[in-house]
Amino acid sequence: MNTFGENIKITVFGQSHAEAIGVTIDGLPSGTEIDGQYVQRLLDLRAPGRSDVSTKRKEPDKVEFISGVIDGKTCGTSVCAVIKNTDMHSKDYSNLLHKPRPSHADYPAMVKYGENYDIRGGGQFSGRLTAPICIAGAVALGILEKKGVKIASHIYSVGSVSDTPFDTLSDEEWLMEKLCGMDFAVIDEKKGEEMRGVIKSAAENLDSVGGVIECKITGLEAGTGSPMFDGLENVISRAVFGVPAVKGIEFGAGFEGAKMYGSEFNDAYYFDGSGKVRTKTNNAGGICGGMATGMPVIFRAAIKPTPSIARAQETVDLEKGENTVLEIKGRHDPCIVPRANAVIRAAAAIAVLDAIYSE
């Protein structure tokens, strides 16, 4: 359903065009500091209308903690935070009641929920529901940073244009800090301009484009995690797949590793100058047997092209029982990768915090 976590549980609630959306967080010890400004900064990176390559929809996304927090600290009960929905054009969805949009959740949702499905803005399946993920993720990031764990992400690719990848062996603290404050987070800003060009071209052609987000986690002690079904890859993947547009995830060398020989893939151990055990390569992405190796954890998430495009698309009319053509109205991102970057970072933080609290 809409709940994630075994030790720190989060539950996302609301719909795209409901009065509000939000999240509850259970399991945080009393006295845990929550920096509202820190939370708002992450929300601002996800918010629409802040870039020339995003939707023109304006959502201030101002977070309000309505329970569980007193004077910036948790008081031992459920933390609940909400965001009021404001800039809604529900009429844009009136023609979709019986005509499911290609690559949206409309058809299976209509079958599952029938006439009670809230079609407006995609209802509970909307990317709008990633804002509460950012609230919980920002809370998790603040806690993790105090534990020495840092998480950053960047736009690894848009279409066929790729950014410089993270260094898989070093912490790159300066770079990670820089990326966390960027609206269009890329390592190579020239590649970033090329990506913007690809997005603008897609928009001009009444189309959309997808991409990949790369995430890096440092500071995890070796042994953090669990084997089998509660491994670090498992919990991170579950959280990341909670982001509606994600269609794939890989760790370390990922699918490229399947082309290697063991002698090429295996990460050789060595003692560094301080006597700490490290690896000479990091094809495993910092995780073996579901547990951290002490090296940076690296993963990449594939983000599909925005399904709402202005071109006419083939679909069906469920009321008339016939094939038809659909033209989608409204304001949509030609590429959601730049805004999803903050969400992937937030989802990773939620998963890592839950894993740490299980230790």
Image (cartoon, helix red, strand yellow):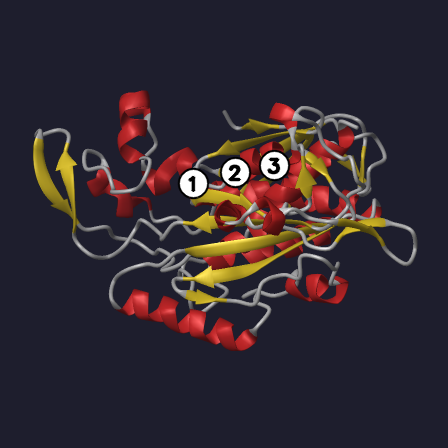
Q: Residue at x 77, y 30 (%)?
A: 357
Cα distance, mark 2 to mark 1? 7 Å
Cα distance, mark 2 to mark 3? 28 Å
Q: Secondary structure at mark 1?
A: loop
Q: Secondary structure at mark 3?
A: helix
Marked residue nearer the N-terminal end (2 or 3): 2
Question: What label does residue 16 carry, if any?
Answer: 1
In the drawing, does residue 102 fall left or right of residue 219? left
In the displayed structure, 23 sits above or below 256; it is above
Q: Which residue in the protein does label 2 denote? A: 21
Q: Position of residue 336 (x, y in %)?
A: 43, 55
In the drawing, does residue 260 fall left or right of residue 207? right
Q: Nearer the viewer, residue 49 or 6?
A: 6
Q: Amino acid at mark 3?
A: Glu
Marked residue nearer the N-terminal end (2 or 1): 1
Q: Amino acid at mark 2?
A: Ile
Q: Are marks 2 and 3 in contact (CB under 8 Å)?
A: no
Q: Position of residue 172 (x, y in %)?
A: 73, 63
In the drawing, does residue 234 fall left or right of residue 323? right
Marked residue nearer the N-terminal end (3 or 1): 1
The label nearer to you, 2 versus 3, is 3
Q: Nearer the viewer, residue 204 or 222?
A: 222
Q: Residue at x 63, y 45 (%)?
A: 284
Residue found at the very far right of the displayed protein: 274
Question: What label does residue 233 carry, if any?
Answer: 3
Q: Position of residue 281 (x, y in %)?
A: 68, 54
Q: Are marks 2 and 1 in contact (CB under 8 Å)?
A: yes
